[in-house]
Image (cartoon, helix red, strand yellow):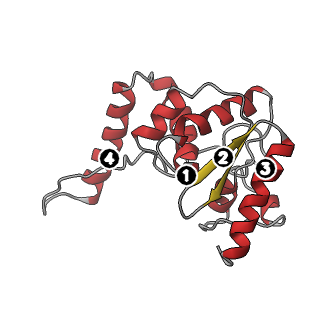
Amino acid sequence: EGWLFPATYEISPQTTALDLIADMVQKTKAELTQLGVEPPRWKAVIIEASLVEAERGSDEDAGKIARVFANRIAQKRPLQLDTTVNYALNRRKVAVSLKDLTVDSPFNTYRHAGLPVGAICSPGVVAIQGVLNPVEGPWLYFVAVNPDTGETKYATTEAEFAVLKAELDKWLAANPGR
């Protein structure tokens, strides 16, 4: 997971699945190299960028979300990402339950501090750039308050986060089953 670069690839009828996978992995390495990432950092950058990719609602969110991750990690706070819980549960949905948050998985960033053990998707250049150049800011929280549009808001305190979470909860109530 994470190493198959999302791009358009030209293939011929003679291209095997193994050839295509090798091309996709090579493209990831080439992009990381072009962005100045040293090989020893590749895995960590891919993992974090996969989280940014999974969480961002727009290109502009990538650097801010990466900043939230950096701020939380610096304070030794767990990342607490619903996307990692959903990955551990092998599903894609917006709402997670309190029971979901207890899933025993090294991908569960509610239970395990820092980055998960691996990527949860294949990040593109925007997410990788967000990780390499996070926007300056004090944020410790973010909430996609409208998952349909991707609108994401940021907070520095738990009280501000609670207001944003209430906004998402209102959206979820209007969009049951999501």
The numbered disc on residue 24 is: 4
Q: Earlier in the sequence, mark 2 or mark 4?
A: 4
Task: Compare residues 161 and 96 and report the one nearer the observer.
Answer: 161
Residue 132 seen: yes
Q: Earlier in the sequence, mark 2 or mark 1?
A: 1
For residue 144, above or below residue 133: below
Mark-to-mark CA distance, 1 and 4: 19 Å
Q: Which residue is mark 1?
A: 54
Q: Quadrant of residue 118?
A: top right
Q: Which residue is mark 3?
A: 110
Q: On the rendered image, what quadrant is the C terminus found in?
A: bottom right
Residue appearing at x 46%, y 49% in the figure = 122
Residue appearing at x 77%, y 44% in the figure = 112
Task: Compare residues 85 and 165 and report the one nearer the observer.
Answer: 165
Q: For this view, does 153 lie left or right of residue 163?
A: left
- Considering the numbered disc 1 on the image, is that residue within a helix, a strand or a loop? helix
Mark-to-mark CA distance, 2 and 1: 16 Å
Q: Which residue is mark 2?
A: 153
